[in-house]
Image: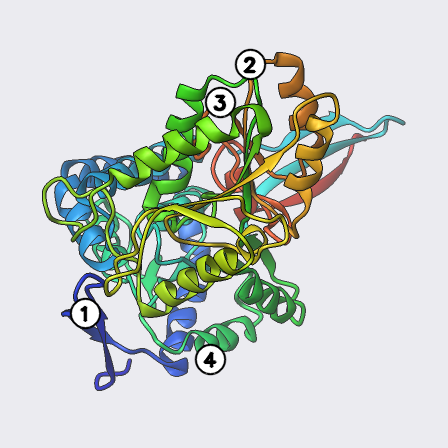
Amino acid sequence: MSDSATFDVLDPADGSVLASLPDLGVDDARAMLDTAAAGQAEWAATPPRERGEILRRAFELVTERADHFARTISLEMGKPLAEAKGEVAYGAEFLRWFAEEAVRVSGTWLTAPAGGSRLLTMKKPVGPVLLITPWNFPLAMATRKIGPAVAAGCTMIVKPAESTPLTTIEFAKVMAEAGLPDGVLQVLTTTHAKETTAALMADARLRKVSFTGSTAVGKALVAQSADNLQRVSMELGGNAPFLVFDDADLDKAVDGAMVAKMRNMGEACTSANRFLVQAGVAEEFSRRLAERMGALKVGRGQDDGVDVGPLIDAKAVAGVRELVDDAVASGARRVVGGDPDGNFFPPTVLVDVPADARVNHEEIFGPVAPVTVFPSGADGEAEAIRMANDTEYGLASYVFTRDVGRVLRVSERLQFGMVGVNTGLVSNPAAPFGGVKSSGFGREGGFTGIEEYLDTTYVGIAAD
């Protein structure tokens, strides 16, 4: 392994150095794959109960050390401590969920329709996997991938984002303490993501890639996977619409908007990106939302009473500001908000946002809520659906209405993998998380999550 090159992990609040880590390269990545491939058969043969117990112990350890993990997350990613503790609880639940799923992997047995033979199917771990996690949820995105991989019996190489690797390193230590054998989980810390990932995917021993990140990178990884026909799971970008109809409970709608928009300072793929509000309630909804957004306290994530921490880096700040400036230049009006201070971006509400403004078509990834109005009356519902679907993305969406019939009609017609009804939070370890269109494919969590790490073998058995 490399023993000279390093890179610094920075605190996004002030740019100070939190740690210096080995900057691993292609040779290091290949050595990790050697280890993963060599240990795959033995790890796959481990009893499912044993794998499940490792995950259960890891759940308990993470829960016991919630404050430590929350502080690490807050320091390297920026989110407030209270929100970081929420991520720890959420991330730990994937360990508990897949601890229970490890012993439920099963096949089928049936008689061939024409008789004369029996049809047996069995599930096997897909093999060594590469797990690429993003910076915005450094613990939860790791556990959401590592949990099912461990439960299924796959060896793993985890490549965390270079901005937030410290949480992943701490979690790998917990997995070892919980009893995970050496070499089953390896952490690839690197600033050479493109080169190391390409080298791993060029090796046929790697059998699966799970990636959470941008659509552009996801498309490149899917193309690379073709040479060795590796299985891929892609959880990519989002452009979530937040639909508020005239009959909505506005108290619930504003509460839901605050959760859907401000979770993680808006730096989430499920974040409400476009607020599509029916004309009859648009003014009141916007007023209430601006009042709530303007009352949020911005500051360092570890300080008391802070609601909104810094964005991840200066590039992210510049990108969000560019979208706001474009919207204002297009005719939008800023009700609350202002200029950023370093990496701190003030919560912003924009009204009168034209439908064609960039902020309605690009992922914001920041604390900006653009409000666009759709008409009341008979044609309003159809127009809201049209506007919501007018995007290449299809991850999360939100609908607020009291009309049960409308809930069904709109949910069936929305082109998104997830729909939150009268709630601003759809993520749940027990639910299948994923999208359609340019938001990717595959599902994480829920009963289907472990299937992403399993192959099916069919065995035909003569009855005579």
Which element type, helix, strand or loop, lies under badge 4? helix
Please indicate whether residue 57 sits to the left or right of residue 287 in the image: left
Q: Distance between the residues labelled 3 and 4?
A: 44 Å
Q: Image quadrant of residue 25? A: bottom left
Is the residue 14 above or below the residue 253 in the image?
below
| Callouts 1 and 2 close, C-beta under 8 Å | no
Q: Which residue is drawn at 71% across and 41% down?
A: 459
Mark 1 or 4, which is nearer the eye? 1
Report the Cα–Cα distance between label 3 and label 1: 39 Å
Tell which circle, 1 or 2, labels the residue nearer the N-terminal end: 1
Few, some or many C-alpha atoms within 10 Å of disc 1 (few <14, some 14-19, many ≥20)? few
Please state if 408 lies on the left or on the right of 379 as rendered.
Answer: left
Identify residue for label 1. Answer: 15
Q: Residue at x 57, y 21 (%)?
A: 246
For the residue labelled by badge 3, is the local secondary structure a helix, a strand or a loop?
A: loop
Q: Name the residue under label 3.
A: 422
Q: Which quarter of the figure is the C terminus placed in?
A: top right
Q: Is mark 2 on a helix, strand or loop?
A: loop
Query: Of callouts 2 and 3, which one flags the residue occurring earlier in the amino acid sequence?
Result: 2
